[in-house]
Amino acid sequence: MRKVLAWFALAGVVVLTGCNTMAGAGKDIQRGGEKMEDAAHDVKQKM
């Protein structure tokens, strides 16, 4: 019984860690996209 509980606890930690990692990656990608939009807007204004 303790082994089963330990496996469930380990699986929970892995899932939660994965979610936080993906959320951080999503935010980084979003910031990169915003920078690209800003750069495109600046170029468009210069034309």
Image (cartoon, grey):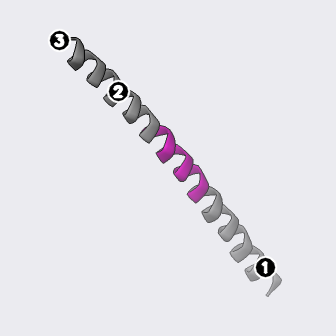
* Amino acid type at image mark 3: Met
Residues in magenta? 19-29
| Residue 16 placement, left or right of 42 | right
Type of amino acid at the residue the image marks with label 1: Lys
User: Which residue is pictured at 33% across the width and 21% down the height?
Assistant: 39
Q: Secondary structure at mark 2?
A: helix
| Label 3 sits on residue | 47
* 35 in relation to 19, above or below: above
Within 10 angstroms of label 3, few (less than 14), some, or many (20 or more) residues? few
Q: Badge 1: few (under 14), some or many (20 or more) residues near its Cα, within 10 Å?
A: few
Residue at image location 63% in from the left, 63% down from the top: 16
* Residue at figure coordinates x 44%, y 39% from the top left: 29
* Image quadrant where residue 35 sits: top left
- Quadrant of the image containing the N terminus: bottom right
Give the secondary structure at mark 3: loop
Image-based side of 3 in relation to 16, left or right: right
- Residue labelled with disc 1: 3
Mark-to-mark CA distance, 2 and 1: 53 Å
Which residue is most to the front?
45
Give the left or right position of residue 28, taking residue 5 as reference: left
Q: Would you place residue 41 above or below residue 25 in this image? A: above
Q: Quadrant of residue 37?
A: top left
Q: Vertically, is 8 above or below 10?
A: below
Q: Main secondary structure of the magenta part?
A: helix
- Of callouts 2 and 1, which one flags the residue occurring earlier in the amino acid sequence? 1
Q: What whole-number distance in Å separates the C-alpha atoms at marks 2 and 3? A: 15 Å
Residue 28: x %, y % from top left: 50, 39
Residue that numbered label 2 is attached to: 38
Kindly check if marks 3 and 1 are in contact, taking CB atoms under 8 A apart as contact. no
Quadrant (top left/top right/bottom left/bottom right) for the C terminus: top left
Q: Is residue 1 above or below residue 8?
A: below
